[in-house]
Image: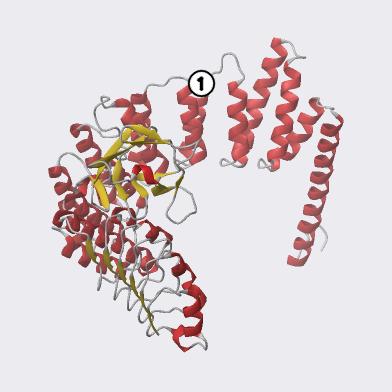
Amino acid sequence: MHGRLKVKTSEEQAEAKRLEREQKLKLYQSATQTVFQKRQAGELDESVLELTSQILGANPDFATLWNCRREVLQRLEAQKSPEELAALVKTELGFLESCLRVNPKSYGTWHHRCWLLGRLPEPNWARELELCARFLEVDERNFHCWDYRRFVAAQAAVPPAEELAFTDSLITRNFSNYSSWHYRSCLLPQLHPQPDSGPQGRLPEDVLLKELELVQNAFFTDPNDQSAWFYHRWLLGRADPQDALRCLHVSRDEACLTVSFSRPVLVGPRTETLLLMVDESPLAVEWRTPDGRNWPGHVWLCDLPATSLNDQLPHHTFRVIWTAGDAQKECVLLKGHQEGWCRDSATDEQLFRCELSVEKSTVLQSELESCKELQELEPENKWCLLTIILLMRALDPLLYEKETLQYFQTLKAVDPMRAAYLDDLRSKFLLENSLLKMEYAEVRVLHLGHKDLTVLCHLEQLLLVTHLDLSHNRLRALPPALAALRCLEVLQANDNAIESLDGVTNLPRLQELSLCNNRLQQPMVLQPLASCPRLVLLNLQGNPLCQAVGTSEYLTELLPLVNSILV
């Protein structure tokens, strides 16, 4: 038995590792405590650098210790000679590189390197670019390193064309590279800026076609990788639409002016500024949102004094100036009329085609054909199916409506885990199509029944609607944004799954509300209806609350002005 190596059992090995971990933990805690004591005592010397090196070398994600090192280095800057300081910086850079080898995705290490290089009079940016290249050689998807490379390239004034070529090399090696695709989306607008009058973010057609060819190679090579699909969507996208006042409405009965914006805004003395001119004279008013919450929204309104609505003049002119958005809109209230409005007749492209749109429809058509070709090869690829839907929306939402719904059915079967998201997206598109049809017909009645809707959106577009039918859908709530429908007189929402009425609040013209066969459980959920002064007919038949004791008495007390309550 002599001379034979004794093999430890698994229990002995586990115990030895436990003792080793305990010893390391004691050393770690002791060193950390010493650093904090020295910091509190103001002893920021090179011994702190040595202690923090021991800890950060094993755990580079200790952010407080990086702060300690910065404090020490700042103090030593004033004490060291230039030669000594240069040697200290060289040592620090080497230490940082060793920490990055321990954890290449350490936030604190990359941040400390940015801080250190930013304090040097003449940093060696070429060396930093080489460092990035080495780490991206190991992991080309390390977004921490990509962030640092963008910082270095900006500091070193590296031409965008060179950086674009660098992304080419990494994408060619591995298409599945979110950071590299994203970097291209930052570089291409710099290389091909649009004139001030042109749409920002668009690419020239020859560049666009070249990029589309590159990204098609990517998703034909690996159709299940999402990074190329996201970049493809960016390529076919466009910048946000210009700020605009969509609609201006004045009501004599409510003594109120309502304005609808192209994007959510927060109106106030320190935020977005609205100026109201009545008959060319400025009028100071208090702005609020329809639901009274005064958070960012598409619709804002204000009360008008009686002097601005009198019938002595043949008409009154109301002009709203949005100073932050550099936009304005004017409407006229004629003598003897109870309301007046001004609303732009917007096309589908202006309203809803912001996500995917380019000047040349031929490009979109070509992309649609390519995606359909890929879908034949990969019939269960969810990214391909979703892109087909978005392309058809961009080309012609009404023409492709039936085909889009068929693709949604296929997509839900392929990707059942995202069925709820897809239902909401489908609802959004169907609502957009209905709004476009209403826009073209120039009516104030909107029928959205029997569409299997799960969500309501774009309600700010319905400011002038007087009759709204939401029956026979799958809605679970009437959202707060519904309060934007200031002209709504009749609302039908029968045969849904509605449990909340938060949106049916402060509707000044609502007269009839039908909520048959929903899931309203308790009478108190009807509390918002008390804020609708003209409500005269309420139908609640088929809801669970109808079975509750005392419901009729409660509703009579809550809604004394409602003539007919059907339970």
Q: Nearer the viewer, residue 558 or 61?
A: 558
Residue pictured at 60% horizontal, 29% vertical: 113
Tell me where residue 257 appears, x and y as whole percent.
35, 47
- Residue 197 is situated, as x and y percent measured from the top left of the image, at 24, 27
Residue 329: image x %, image y %? 28, 38
On screen, residue 62 versus residue 527, left or right, reads: right
Above or below, 491 relative to 286: below
Q: Image point 40% across, 48% down: which residue? A: 301
How many numbered tags mark residues here? 1
- 200 left or right of 126 in image: left
Which of 559 and 322 lies nearest the eye of the viewer? 559
Element class at badge 1: helix
How crowded is the residue under tag 1: few (<14 C-alpha within 10 Å), some, or many (20+)?
A: some
Q: Nearer the viewer, residue 69 or 421?
A: 421
Residue 566 drawn above or below residue 164: below
Residue 7 showing in the rendered view? no
Q: On the rendered image, what quadrant is the N terminus found in?
A: bottom right
Q: Is residue 396 left or right of residue 311?
A: left
The residue beneath circle 1 is: 125
Residue in view at x 45 percent, y 74 percent: 559
Q: Position of residue 215 (x, y in %)?
A: 27, 44
- Which amino acid type corresponds to the residue marked 1 in the rendered image? Trp
Is the image coloured rainbow, by chain, by secondary structure, or in one colour?
A: secondary structure
Residue beneath the point at 34% across and 46% down? 259
Q: Quadrant of the C terminus?
A: bottom left
Quadrant in the picture for residue 169: top left
Height in image: 515 above or below 505? below
Q: Is residue 251 visible?
A: yes
